[in-house]
Amino acid sequence: MASFKIEGGHPLCGEITPQGAKNEALQVICATLLTAEQVTISNIPDILDVNNLIQLLRDMGVKVKPAQGSAKTDAEQPAHEAEQPEHGTKLPAHGTKKGGNTFVFQADELNLGFLESDEFVNKCAALRGSVMMIGPLLARMGRAVITKPGGDKIGRRRLDTHFMGFKSLGASFRHVDDRNVYEIKAARLKGSYMLLDEASVTGTANIVMAAVLAEGTTTIYNAACEPYIQQLCKMLNSMGADITGIGSNLLTIRGTRVLHGTTHRLLPDMIEVGSFIGMAAMCGNGIRIKDVAPEHLGIIPEAFRRLGVKVRAEGNDLYVPQQTHYIVESFIDGTIMTLADAPWPGLTPDLLSVLIVVATQARGSVLFHQKMFESRLFFVDRLIDMGAQIILCDPHRAVVVGHDRKRQLRGSRMSSPDIRAGIALLIAAMSASGTSTISNIEQIDRGYEDIEARLNALGAHIERIP
């Protein structure tokens, strides 16, 4: 298990460019299973979750190769050549490269026997993104296998929405007791109307990918409409699908029999953009975040502005100046500022951890309400150990009383419980006095590409300890 050793108190200054969007990458890479033709995807981030998904597709027989002129990475190695520890393999640093990988995928000779193997089931169980292979496999091959997928330990993340969607399309399920997996089959999926019980991003993606090859028309109401879903639908349309209502919570999919190849580029990762805003607020001396595609950030910049952080949009960039103090806004009636997560276009839950860290040094108090996951706020115990003034009201709510920089957080030893709490703790450590150690940084590697090198280039002092 690797660790970060962080010497806090060093101001960050300069420019940084976000990687390609992790959540979008997991969806569109799975969508390459829908066609036998070549699909080229660019701006793929070099992170654990994405690399492990690419390796899993290779194990299934998908041909994956770098596009001409793209940097060679470990993702193109055969499985027997790449060491695969429990949490996957992090690709080597690429110097100044920032999320520039372009790969060509071709799923024309799938090894369906591998889908029945224990090796496939075990790999899926360790990688949450693998759940989005079910829709494409069911639509194109008529069958799929599912086990409980891995991922962050942030609370219950049920798959009922996925199952209900597939059932509406005509799929049947059988539980295999001795392997603890579900076998899903359908001779030919048939379009239908469905009202999702929750606006699940992965559930919507899975159902959309199944419906594009179904017979007839599928209508999905209460669909997720995050930029990731919009991008997936646009890519599928470029492959020959017929999806309307993109960007809304009502999607209409008219099924087709065959999809063809296409070229697709990932958006910048909006969660990484938000993480960089938080870093700039806590320990920045003027940071420019390059090429962020601001039209796809939703209310993320505004959420930081409510904490008093100055965020200036300049063309396709965001600039966060150095601030001695930032003052939390209050509501018009004078009540305490509350920040709560919500389905898009509301505030993404993936950034609440970073916002909590930023609030520890604001002037004022903030109530954070994490509605979606019951274990995601438990990381605040580490911040309290560092000197933060936080009241954890219950598993879903925390009140942060800001220090207004009158008291600096202090260095500490801690462990990263999940991707987003991990980056939040890293921000806290960079702003703290003294030296901190964060273990289990494989969690951070799952979502952030070569993060220590990129932040050290801005002035941070972060050392990776194997």
Image (spheres, grey):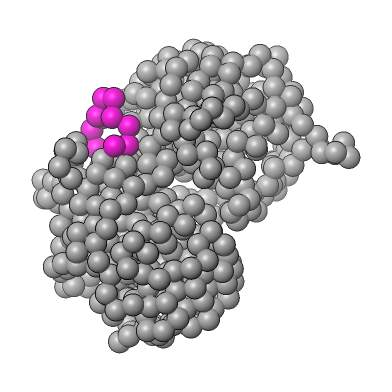
Asked if the stretch drawn in magenta spans residue 98, the answer is yes
The stretch in magenta equals 91-100
Residue for point 36% across, 58% down: 235
Q: Is residue 454 left or right of residue 361?
A: left
Instruction: Work out whether residue 159 or residue 141 is closer to the camera in this orientation and state it.
Output: 141
Magenta-colored stretch includes residue 272 = no
Residue 408 seen in render: yes
Q: Where's residue 155, x and y in %?
A: 54, 55
Q: Nearer the viewer, residue 137 or 123?
A: 137
Near-viewer residue (121 or 63): 63
Give coordinates of residue 102: x percent, y percent: 24, 44
Instruction: Give coordinates of residue 446: x percent, y percent.
Output: 37, 42
**Does residue 117 sit above or below 193 in this rendering?**
above
The image shows a total of numbered marks equal to 0
Q: Is residue 108 left or right of residue 399?
A: left
Residue 14, above or below 370: above
Dividing the picture into quadrants, the one containing residue 338 is top right
Quarter in which the C terminus is drawn: top left
Q: Is residue 377 above or below residue 177?
A: above
Name the quarter where the N terminus is drawn.
Answer: top left
Q: Is residue 143 visible?
A: no
The residue drawn where x is 34% and y is 23% is: 453
Which residue corresponds to the image point at 24% horizontal and 57% vertical from the top-left? 39
What is the residue that sits farthest to the right in this orientation?
A: 333
Q: Nearer the viewer, residue 207 or 9?
A: 207
User: Which residue is painted at 58% across and 76% down in the image?
Assistant: 195
Q: Position of residue 135 (x, y in %)?
A: 36, 70
Give the main secondary structure of the magenta stretch: loop
